[in-house]
């Protein structure tokens, strides 16, 4: 019996106890860390996407990555035991993109702990923590990310910038919370950095101890805890100013697409003050992935022209659902 199966067996005897499965995970992490010392990783990206019962968002997220990533990459979809059509959709993506899209179905809802499990299986030099509600993405984000890590040696966690409009704040704090650092054509906003679509390197990830793993606490703040580890080790986190994603977080998008149950699952144990938000929001229009893509293009154009990111306006399109593969 190996360490992983032993940890699972012991955890089953002691349900909802994080200590036993966490020890088993740490043993796997250490084994992988030792192995990595002998490996020269290829200059590519391992994107780990955790999802549960949000197929319409997921389709757009996968499509955005495939359409806009230029360097070698793999996309590991960690399915937190969805009970909708997620399995079928992901298997279709696997067939269409063999060796690129990898579908991994978990036995239950691990929440954000799924990222730590996914990174154990990643094969490239750069690791990406990606939410399933990233509906659009700047083309060439990967080349810009590598340039940022080369120019800022103590950069440890790099998020893409977000569009902010009438439907979402993208998870980003007020601009007053950030300071700018610029080298050549790369500008970082240094301040609160979330894991909506954020990059770290395998060597830094191993050095600071990786993401947190608490399988019976499904939604730990894996990104915030990781940034604190980085800070203790002399690294910093920031946002890549010129490269954008549309992060459809918040109550508006979730209610518009009928994801109230997922919202409740995430916040019922922690941040209970968020629970009423999705029921209070008024849905006037249903924005689409096409709208999200248009807003990313608009953000890029405004940045190139020396303006700010979109805070309002932009084309609004409505339709019944996102595009499925």
Image (cartoon, rainbow, N blue to C red):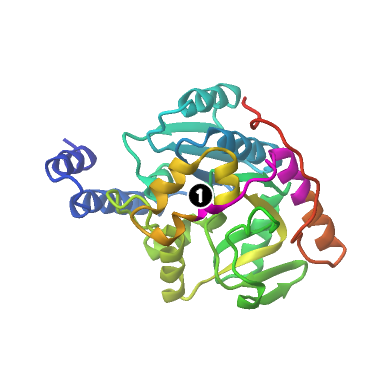
* Residue at the (63%, 59%) spot, across then down: 169
Q: Is residue 280 magenta?
A: yes
Instruction: Determine whether the residue tagged by mark 1 lies in a helix, strand or loop.
Output: helix
Q: 10 Å neighbourhood of mark 1: few (<14), some, or many (≥20)?
A: few
Q: Position of residue 60 (x, y in %)?
A: 63, 37
Question: Where is residue 285, by image quadrant?
Answer: top right
Q: Decide: is 319 above or below 316.
A: above
Q: Decide: is 238 above or below 85.
A: below
* Residue placed under numbered mark 1 in the picture: 279
- Res 116 visible: yes
Residue closest to the far right: 305
Which residues fall within the magenta stretch?
277-296
Question: Where is residue 309, by image quadrant?
Answer: bottom right
Image quarter hosting the C terminus: top right
Q: Position of residue 244 (x, y in %)?
A: 70, 55
> What count of labels does the image hold?
1
* Residue at the (68%, 76%) spot, across then down: 180
Q: Position of residue 90 (x, y in %)?
A: 51, 28
């Amino acid at each position: 019996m190996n360490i992983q199966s032993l940890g699972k067996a012991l955890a089953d005897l002691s349900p909802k106890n994080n200590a036993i499965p966490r020890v088993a995970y740490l043993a796997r992490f250490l084994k992988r860390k030792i192995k990595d010392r002998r490996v020269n990783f290829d200059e590519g990206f391992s994107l780990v996407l955790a999802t549960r019962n949000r197929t319409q968002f997921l389709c757009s997220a996968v499509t955005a990555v495939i359409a806009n990533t230029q360097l070698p990459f793999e996309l590991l979809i960690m399915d937190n035991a969805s009970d909708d059509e997620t399995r079928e959709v992901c298997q279709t993506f696997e067939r269409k993109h063999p060796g690129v899209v990898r579908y991994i179905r978990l036995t239950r809802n691990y929440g954000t702990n799924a990222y730590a499990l996914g990174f154990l299986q990643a094969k490239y030099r750069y690791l990406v923590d990606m939410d399933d509600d990233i509906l659009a993405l700047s083309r060439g984000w990967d080349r810009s990310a590598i340039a940022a890590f080369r120019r800022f040696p103590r950069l440890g966690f790099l998020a893409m910038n977000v569009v902010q409009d009438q439907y979402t704040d993208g998870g980003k704090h007020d601009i007053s919370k950030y300071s700018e650092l610029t080298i050549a054509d790369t500008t970082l906003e240094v301040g609160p950095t979330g894991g909506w679509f954020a990059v770290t390197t395998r060597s830094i990830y191993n050095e600071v101890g990786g993401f947190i793993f608490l399988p019976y606490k499904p939604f730990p703040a894996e990104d915030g805890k990781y940034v604190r580890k980085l800070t203790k080790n002399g690294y910093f986190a920031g946002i890549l100013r010129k490269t954008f994603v549309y992060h459809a977080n918040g109550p508006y998008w979730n209610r518009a697409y009928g994801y109230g149950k997922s919202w409740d699952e995430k916040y019922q144990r922690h941040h209970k003050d968020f629970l009423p938000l999705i029921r209070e929001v008024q849905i006037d229009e249903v924005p689409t992935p096409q709208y999200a893509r248009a807003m990313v293009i608009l953000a890029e154009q405004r940045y190139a022209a020396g303006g700010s990111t979109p805070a309002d306006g932009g084309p609004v399109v409505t339709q019944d659902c996102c595009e499925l593969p």
